[in-house]
Image (cartoon, rainbow, N blue to C red):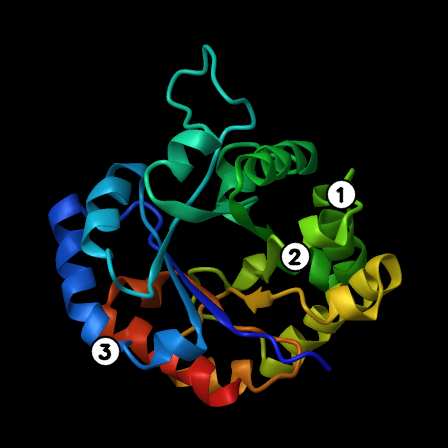
Amino acid sequence: MTKRKPLVAANWKMHKTAAEAVSFVEELLPLVAASSEECDLLICPSFTNLVPLNDALAGSAVRLGAQDVHWEEEGAFTGAVSASMILTSGCVSVILGHSERRQFFSETDEIVNRKLGASIRAGLKAIVCVGETLEERQAGQIEGVVIGQVEAALNGITSDDTLLQVAFAYEPIWAIGTGSTATPEQAGEVHRLIRNWLRKQFGDATADSVVIQYGGSVKPENADELFAQEDIDGGLVGGASLNPVSFAAIANAAVRQS
Protein backbone atom coordinates (compact mmCIF):
# COMPACT_ATOMS: atom_id res chain seq x y z
CA MET A 1 0.00 0.00 0.00
CA THR A 2 1.21 3.50 -0.84
CA LYS A 3 2.07 5.52 2.24
CA ARG A 4 0.05 8.73 1.99
CA LYS A 5 1.07 11.96 3.68
CA PRO A 6 -1.85 12.96 5.92
CA LEU A 7 -3.69 16.21 5.39
CA VAL A 8 -5.12 18.10 8.35
CA ALA A 9 -7.21 21.09 7.34
CA ALA A 10 -8.82 23.74 9.54
CA ASN A 11 -12.27 24.75 8.34
CA TRP A 12 -12.98 27.92 10.30
CA LYS A 13 -16.41 28.42 8.74
CA MET A 14 -17.74 31.90 9.62
CA HIS A 15 -15.37 32.64 12.48
CA LYS A 16 -12.48 35.06 13.21
CA THR A 17 -11.72 38.61 12.17
CA ALA A 18 -8.46 39.32 10.36
CA ALA A 19 -6.75 40.31 13.61
CA GLU A 20 -7.95 37.14 15.34
CA ALA A 21 -6.80 35.03 12.41
CA VAL A 22 -3.29 36.48 12.43
CA SER A 23 -3.05 36.05 16.21
CA PHE A 24 -4.07 32.40 15.81
CA VAL A 25 -1.33 31.76 13.26
CA GLU A 26 1.31 33.43 15.43
CA GLU A 27 0.43 31.03 18.24
CA LEU A 28 0.07 27.98 16.00
CA LEU A 29 3.29 28.04 14.01
CA PRO A 30 5.72 27.23 16.86
CA LEU A 31 3.45 24.35 17.88
CA VAL A 32 3.50 22.62 14.47
CA ALA A 33 7.03 23.32 13.26
CA ALA A 34 7.93 19.62 13.37
CA SER A 35 4.52 18.24 12.38
CA SER A 36 4.31 20.25 9.19
CA GLU A 37 7.20 18.27 7.66
CA GLU A 38 5.32 14.98 8.00
CA CYS A 39 1.76 16.22 7.63
CA ASP A 40 0.25 18.69 5.17
CA LEU A 41 -1.41 21.46 7.16
CA LEU A 42 -4.05 23.73 5.70
CA ILE A 43 -6.03 26.65 7.13
CA CYS A 44 -9.28 27.55 5.37
CA PRO A 45 -10.59 30.88 6.68
CA SER A 46 -13.25 33.24 5.37
CA PHE A 47 -12.48 35.09 2.13
CA THR A 48 -11.75 38.32 4.02
CA ASN A 49 -8.89 36.63 5.90
CA LEU A 50 -7.07 35.14 2.93
CA VAL A 51 -4.68 38.00 2.17
CA PRO A 52 -3.68 38.81 5.77
CA LEU A 53 -3.18 35.11 6.51
CA ASN A 54 -1.13 34.64 3.36
CA ASP A 55 1.24 37.27 4.72
CA ALA A 56 1.23 35.74 8.21
CA LEU A 57 2.00 32.24 6.88
CA ALA A 58 4.85 33.37 4.59
CA GLY A 59 7.90 31.18 5.05
CA SER A 60 6.03 28.49 6.98
CA ALA A 61 4.92 25.04 5.81
CA VAL A 62 1.28 25.74 6.67
CA ARG A 63 -0.71 26.42 3.53
CA LEU A 64 -3.87 28.39 2.83
CA GLY A 65 -7.21 27.20 1.45
CA ALA A 66 -10.62 28.69 0.75
CA GLN A 67 -14.01 27.43 1.88
CA ASP A 68 -15.80 27.75 -1.45
CA VAL A 69 -15.45 28.94 -5.05
CA HIS A 70 -17.71 29.89 -7.95
CA TRP A 71 -17.69 27.77 -11.09
CA GLU A 72 -17.35 30.71 -13.50
CA GLU A 73 -14.12 32.64 -14.05
CA GLU A 74 -15.84 36.04 -13.98
CA GLY A 75 -19.21 37.66 -14.58
CA ALA A 76 -22.30 39.13 -12.99
CA PHE A 77 -22.33 36.94 -9.87
CA THR A 78 -22.70 39.31 -6.94
CA GLY A 79 -20.98 38.03 -3.82
CA ALA A 80 -19.15 35.22 -5.60
CA VAL A 81 -15.38 34.60 -5.75
CA SER A 82 -13.61 32.90 -8.65
CA ALA A 83 -10.86 30.30 -8.59
CA SER A 84 -8.27 32.73 -9.99
CA MET A 85 -9.14 35.27 -7.27
CA ILE A 86 -8.62 32.58 -4.65
CA LEU A 87 -5.38 31.43 -6.25
CA THR A 88 -3.92 34.92 -6.35
CA SER A 89 -4.85 35.43 -2.70
CA GLY A 90 -2.35 32.73 -1.78
CA CYS A 91 -4.52 29.62 -1.69
CA VAL A 92 -3.38 26.22 -2.83
CA SER A 93 -6.68 24.44 -2.19
CA VAL A 94 -10.42 24.88 -1.74
CA ILE A 95 -13.15 23.03 0.14
CA LEU A 96 -16.05 21.97 -2.09
CA GLY A 97 -19.48 20.54 -1.32
CA HIS A 98 -19.38 20.85 2.45
CA SER A 99 -22.64 19.62 3.92
CA GLU A 100 -23.43 23.13 5.15
CA ARG A 101 -23.10 24.43 1.59
CA ARG A 102 -25.37 21.64 0.40
CA GLN A 103 -27.90 22.23 3.18
CA PHE A 104 -28.02 26.02 3.54
CA PHE A 105 -27.05 27.12 0.03
CA SER A 106 -28.79 24.40 -1.98
CA GLU A 107 -25.61 23.09 -3.61
CA THR A 108 -26.23 20.02 -5.75
CA ASP A 109 -23.86 17.32 -6.95
CA GLU A 110 -23.82 19.06 -10.34
CA ILE A 111 -22.74 22.36 -8.78
CA VAL A 112 -19.97 20.61 -6.85
CA ASN A 113 -18.78 19.02 -10.09
CA ARG A 114 -18.72 22.38 -11.88
CA LYS A 115 -16.82 23.98 -9.01
CA LEU A 116 -14.32 21.13 -9.02
CA GLY A 117 -13.71 21.61 -12.74
CA ALA A 118 -13.14 25.34 -12.28
CA SER A 119 -10.75 24.73 -9.38
CA ILE A 120 -8.64 22.21 -11.27
CA ARG A 121 -8.48 24.39 -14.39
CA ALA A 122 -7.18 27.27 -12.26
CA GLY A 123 -4.50 25.11 -10.65
CA LEU A 124 -6.13 24.69 -7.25
CA LYS A 125 -6.31 21.43 -5.36
CA ALA A 126 -9.69 20.57 -3.89
CA ILE A 127 -11.16 18.84 -0.86
CA VAL A 128 -14.50 17.35 -1.92
CA CYS A 129 -16.84 16.66 1.01
CA VAL A 130 -19.21 13.70 0.98
CA GLY A 131 -21.40 12.15 3.64
CA GLU A 132 -24.78 10.82 4.67
CA THR A 133 -27.49 12.04 7.03
CA LEU A 134 -28.54 10.03 10.07
CA GLU A 135 -31.75 9.03 8.28
CA GLU A 136 -29.79 7.77 5.27
CA ARG A 137 -27.46 5.80 7.53
CA GLN A 138 -30.35 4.22 9.40
CA ALA A 139 -31.99 3.30 6.09
CA GLY A 140 -28.85 1.47 4.94
CA GLN A 141 -28.15 3.99 2.19
CA ILE A 142 -24.59 4.93 3.17
CA GLU A 143 -22.85 3.42 0.16
CA GLY A 144 -25.39 4.68 -2.36
CA VAL A 145 -25.31 8.23 -1.00
CA VAL A 146 -21.57 8.58 -0.43
CA ILE A 147 -20.37 6.82 -3.57
CA GLY A 148 -23.04 8.66 -5.53
CA GLN A 149 -21.58 11.97 -4.35
CA VAL A 150 -18.02 10.86 -5.18
CA GLU A 151 -19.02 9.68 -8.64
CA ALA A 152 -21.00 12.85 -9.38
CA ALA A 153 -18.16 15.11 -8.24
CA LEU A 154 -15.70 13.32 -10.54
CA ASN A 155 -17.98 13.31 -13.57
CA GLY A 156 -15.81 14.09 -16.59
CA ILE A 157 -12.53 13.50 -14.75
CA THR A 158 -10.70 10.64 -16.39
CA SER A 159 -7.04 11.53 -15.86
CA ASP A 160 -5.15 9.98 -12.97
CA ASP A 161 -3.02 13.12 -12.67
CA THR A 162 -6.15 15.25 -12.35
CA LEU A 163 -7.66 12.97 -9.72
CA LEU A 164 -4.53 13.33 -7.62
CA GLN A 165 -5.35 17.03 -7.27
CA VAL A 166 -8.48 15.97 -5.37
CA ALA A 167 -8.79 14.88 -1.76
CA PHE A 168 -12.03 13.63 -0.29
CA ALA A 169 -13.39 14.38 3.16
CA TYR A 170 -15.90 11.88 4.49
CA GLU A 171 -18.11 13.84 6.84
CA PRO A 172 -21.11 12.01 8.25
CA ILE A 173 -23.59 14.87 8.47
CA TRP A 174 -24.97 13.59 11.77
CA ALA A 175 -21.53 14.10 13.36
CA ILE A 176 -20.77 17.65 12.22
CA GLY A 177 -20.86 20.18 15.03
CA THR A 178 -22.96 17.83 17.16
CA GLY A 179 -20.26 16.45 19.40
CA SER A 180 -21.12 12.98 18.08
CA THR A 181 -18.41 11.21 16.16
CA ALA A 182 -18.49 8.15 13.96
CA THR A 183 -16.56 5.39 15.67
CA PRO A 184 -13.15 4.74 14.12
CA GLU A 185 -14.56 1.52 12.69
CA GLN A 186 -17.61 3.25 11.18
CA ALA A 187 -15.46 5.95 9.63
CA GLY A 188 -12.87 3.47 8.40
CA GLU A 189 -15.54 1.37 6.71
CA VAL A 190 -16.80 4.29 4.63
CA HIS A 191 -13.26 5.37 3.76
CA ARG A 192 -12.65 1.85 2.45
CA LEU A 193 -15.83 2.05 0.36
CA ILE A 194 -14.56 5.26 -1.25
CA ARG A 195 -11.07 3.88 -1.87
CA ASN A 196 -12.39 0.61 -3.29
CA TRP A 197 -14.62 2.53 -5.70
CA LEU A 198 -11.63 4.62 -6.78
CA ARG A 199 -9.66 1.38 -7.20
CA LYS A 200 -12.26 0.00 -9.61
CA GLN A 201 -12.37 3.22 -11.60
CA PHE A 202 -8.73 4.31 -11.64
CA GLY A 203 -6.62 1.33 -10.57
CA ASP A 204 -4.60 0.44 -7.51
CA ALA A 205 -1.77 2.96 -7.76
CA THR A 206 -4.03 5.97 -8.11
CA ALA A 207 -6.58 4.80 -5.54
CA ASP A 208 -3.82 4.17 -3.01
CA SER A 209 -2.47 7.69 -3.54
CA VAL A 210 -5.71 9.66 -3.03
CA VAL A 211 -6.03 11.35 0.35
CA ILE A 212 -9.32 10.68 2.16
CA GLN A 213 -9.83 12.71 5.32
CA TYR A 214 -12.36 12.26 8.08
CA GLY A 215 -14.51 15.24 9.06
CA GLY A 216 -17.07 15.16 11.83
CA SER A 217 -16.24 16.39 15.34
CA VAL A 218 -12.54 15.54 15.14
CA LYS A 219 -10.93 16.45 18.47
CA PRO A 220 -7.56 15.87 20.15
CA GLU A 221 -9.30 13.23 22.27
CA ASN A 222 -10.36 11.04 19.34
CA ALA A 223 -7.82 11.95 16.64
CA ASP A 224 -5.35 9.13 17.38
CA GLU A 225 -8.03 6.43 17.14
CA LEU A 226 -9.50 7.86 13.95
CA PHE A 227 -6.16 8.39 12.21
CA ALA A 228 -5.01 4.89 13.14
CA GLN A 229 -7.51 3.53 10.62
CA GLU A 230 -5.65 2.42 7.49
CA ASP A 231 -7.70 4.45 5.01
CA ILE A 232 -8.10 7.66 7.06
CA ASP A 233 -5.53 10.23 5.97
CA GLY A 234 -5.96 13.09 8.41
CA GLY A 235 -8.95 15.26 9.11
CA LEU A 236 -11.08 18.19 8.03
CA VAL A 237 -11.45 19.90 11.38
CA GLY A 238 -14.22 22.33 12.32
CA GLY A 239 -14.75 23.52 15.88
CA ALA A 240 -11.49 22.11 17.24
CA SER A 241 -9.53 24.03 14.60
CA LEU A 242 -10.52 27.38 16.15
CA ASN A 243 -8.02 26.85 18.97
CA PRO A 244 -4.34 26.68 17.96
CA VAL A 245 -3.38 24.28 20.74
CA SER A 246 -6.22 21.94 19.85
CA PHE A 247 -5.48 22.08 16.13
CA ALA A 248 -1.78 21.44 16.73
CA ALA A 249 -2.63 18.41 18.88
CA ILE A 250 -4.72 16.97 16.04
CA ALA A 251 -1.88 17.57 13.57
CA ASN A 252 0.54 15.81 15.91
CA ALA A 253 -1.87 12.85 16.14
CA ALA A 254 -1.86 12.58 12.34
CA VAL A 255 1.94 12.44 12.38
CA ARG A 256 1.98 9.76 15.07
CA GLN A 257 -0.41 7.54 13.12
CA SER A 258 1.05 8.13 9.64
Q: Amino acid at mark 1?
A: Ile
Q: CA distance from mark 2 to mark 3?
A: 29 Å
Q: Residues within 10 Å of mark 3 (few under 14, many from 20)?
A: some
Q: Is residue 151 above or below residue 230?
A: above
- For marks 3 and 1, the one nearer the N-term is 3
Residue at numbered disc 1: 157
Residue 139 is at least partly visible in this image: no
Residue 201 placement, left or right of 151: right
Percent from the top left, x then y, of residue 250?
A: 38, 77
Q: Are marks 2 and 3 in contact (CB under 8 Å)?
A: no
Residue that badge 3 annotates? 31
> Which quadrant would the N terminus be assigned to in this image?
bottom right
Q: Residue furthest top?
A: 76
Give whichever of 207, 190 is nearer the camera. Answer: 207
Give the SS element for disc 1: loop
Say few, some or many: other residues with alpha carbon within 10 Å of mark 2 (under 14 / 14 to 19 / 20 or more): some
Going by the image, does 167 lie left or right of 27?
A: right
Q: Residue 164: which quarter of the image?
A: bottom right
Looking at this view, name the residue that lies furthest to the right.
Answer: 200
Above-or-below relation of 65 to 215:
above
**Distance of label 3 from label 1 (alpha carbons):** 38 Å
Residue 245 at x, y percent in the picture = 23, 75
x and y, in percent, of residue 185 in the image? 65, 82
Which of the labelled discs sits on residue 164, or is there none? 2
Q: Nearer the viewer, residue 41 or 76?
A: 41
- Please indicate whether residue 159 sits to the left or right of residue 59 in the image: right
